[in-house]
Amino acid sequence: MPRRRTGAAIPEMFRVMLEKPTTEAYPYKPIELTQRYRGKLDIDPAKCTGCQVCAMVCPAGVITMIELGTRKVGDRELPVRRPIFDLSTCISCGECVDSCAFNALELTKQFELATPDKKDLMMTKALPK
Amino acid sequence: MSNDQGKPTRREAPAGLIQYSVENLVPFGPIHPALKEPEYFKLVLEGERIVEVIPRIGYVHRGLEKAAEMRPWMQNMYMFERTCGICSFVHSLCYGQAVEGLTLFQTPRRAKYIRLIIAELERIHSHLLWVGLMGHWAGFDTLFMWVWNDREVVLDIVEAISGNRVHKSMNAFCGVRRDMPENMEDRTVERMKYIADRARFYREIIDTEETMLERTEHAGNKVSQETVEKLCAVGPMARYVGLRNDVRLNDPYAAYDEVPFDIVTRNEGDVLALLRLRLDEMVVSANLVSYAVKHLPDGPFRVLIPPVIPAGEHSSHCEAPRGEIFYYVKSGGDRIPERVKSRQPTMANLPTALEILKGQTLADIPVVLTAIDPCFGCMDRMSFLDTETNKQWTWSGEQLRQYGIRYYFPERFKK
Amino acid sequence: MSEVFTQQIEQFAADAKAKTSQPRKGETFVEVDQAKVREFISRLVNEAHVVHLSTMTGLDLDQNLGIIYHFTYGPGWVQVKTFVPKTAPTTKSIVDIIPGAILYEMEIHDMFGVTFEGNPWIDKKLLLPDNWPADLPPPLLKTSKPADIRKRLQLEAPHK
């Protein structure tokens, strides 16, 4: 049978008054992220070869491959493709990063992505100029 | 009816299984921008006592089972992870285990230990959140604030391991996606000790503070063990009447057959027993995480498997913080599944919730409904019909909460 | 204990002229005819004390609709399968044997169109909206397309 008693919370009240606040003063102070934090996706265009494995494994439908023509290898015509990314749909899971055989993709620590226009989040730097 | 101090007591309602009766109620839209997930109850009252509860769910039904039939196996894992925010890892774990059973590959031991660590961390933060919510509905908002402070300790460890606080994306078929970082052992053991101390402190608070005792002792219709078994309740809703139903004990998955632990049961059958049970479970989980981090085996953490899963059917179940999660998977030997069925523990506990609400007063509704730990913020809109005076009205969740606090602690509102 | 239990299940299945199979250790599939499934389940509950029904699943096979009852007993499952033809999707409810099955039957009724006679709440909708058109087929059949459902319920997504 529990007995009623006041005052079980009073030492806690004193402890909390003397402790520094838990709330971080973001955005007036920078916030510290852990080493493994997964933020915005980034691509290195020099390393991308257009193998399209990243487009096949993406669970959120972020990556679309654009056909850019063909090139001759020996006596065969092979297609040339490059990806564009719709980062407003990206969930930063990292499947594309893990599956890229050429280490072209990377998840950065940038997380402030709010914008009034969705077109700001289309990443097309892998397309040739 | 009142006890010796002049406070109202709860009448014991006659035990009986679900019966169908009245319905002439006007439904009101339960969509409300301020609350987490909508649900809708129709309550039939007799004066102050509840006679009948009729649920209506499905307001956040997203059609995941149909969507799963159009996506490859691995992409479904990310979709099912987003079924729930609080128990997201266990959903992807259960789906992963159901699909792994169809292949011939084995999961490495190190991956099983890492899965155990993250599942137990999730259980700790879910129970902490629930204790805070009980404090909020009972009128003890300070408890809510303390608990939110303690959850940060757990979420920091989760972010250090997986990179994110809510949707961890750690599971893969036959393994985990990332290894544990170095130098986690000392930090984790120290923080788990802190969590266990805090759980014991909250236990002392709920045992002695007037606010919590008044609202939760003897709350909820007392039901027998046979009734709970026949209504197929899972998780803490079966363990608080004394049944030893826990998937981690009866059918061990991940690494639960190798680490020593014991489950917690209670006998009293009221909401105070549920509070004690979940706080004791937090201490068990903290000890499990400390043990697993110290005894982590070496070896690989993932085995890569081909994207085509052989034909067959398999099912798997896991112990989520709220109860038993069940997944059934049918494959036709293709890259996409033929049928995936997922059953969340709140749906299994709903008949029991309707049963323990009968005979309670209007002021008890928030506390008793939150006690089953529903995975929806259900007190959105409720429509009431009073059969004695034939009056109909509707209230929002905040109005119901204020009514409950005024009913039990009228001295706080006297001028 | 589980050897005795497996023999008990085989005995019940033989009495009901049902087919059993054990693809993996601990998991038993029993395919029962629709007329005998109620008796099989009541024997399972009353004599073998397998009380916990985890869930009920509906399946869309070409000519029939399948219903699977998943019973959990400690370290394994007994999955009882039965089939209902698409032209006459009606079967008897088991709510008087296991009251906890009431919501699962309502869900299969909403999603596949199977009617369970004897379920007291079978004419109420659990998951579908109140304005679901009566001539639209149930959503989880293979012939139902999400685009049709969106158009009929007027939920077209706005163009980007």
Image: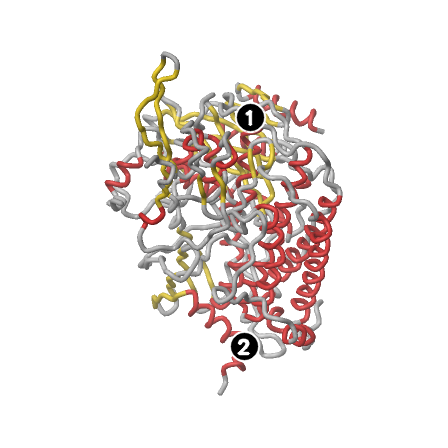
| Residue indicated by mark 1 | B305
The image quadrant that residue A12 belongs to is: bottom right
Structural distance between the alpha carbons of marks 2 and 1: 60 Å
Instruction: Judge whether B7 appears above or below A124 on screen.
Output: below
| Residue indicated by mark 2 | B409
Q: Amino acid at mark 2?
A: Phe
Q: Position of residue B151 (x, y in %)?
A: 60, 59
Instruction: Judge whether B215 appears above or below B194 on screen.
Output: below
Q: Say how the picture is coloured.
A: secondary structure
Q: Is residue C154 left or right of residue B159?
A: left
The chain holding disc 2 is: B
Instruction: Name the outermost residue toward the top.
Output: A75
Q: Is residue B271 left or right of residue C105?
A: right
The chain holding disc 1 is: B
Element type where label 1 sits in the image? loop
Q: Nearer the viewer, residue A129 or B188?
A: A129
Report crowding for label 2: few under 14, some 14 to 19, many 20 or more residues within 10 A (C-alpha): some
Q: Position of residue A28 (x, y in %)?
A: 48, 67
Q: Amino acid at mark 1?
A: Ile
Q: Is residue B6 left or right of residue B259?
A: left
Q: Nearer the viewer, residue B410 or B184?
A: B184
Q: Position of residue C77 (x, y in %)?
A: 59, 31
Which numbered disc, 2 or 1, marks the residue closer to the eye?
1
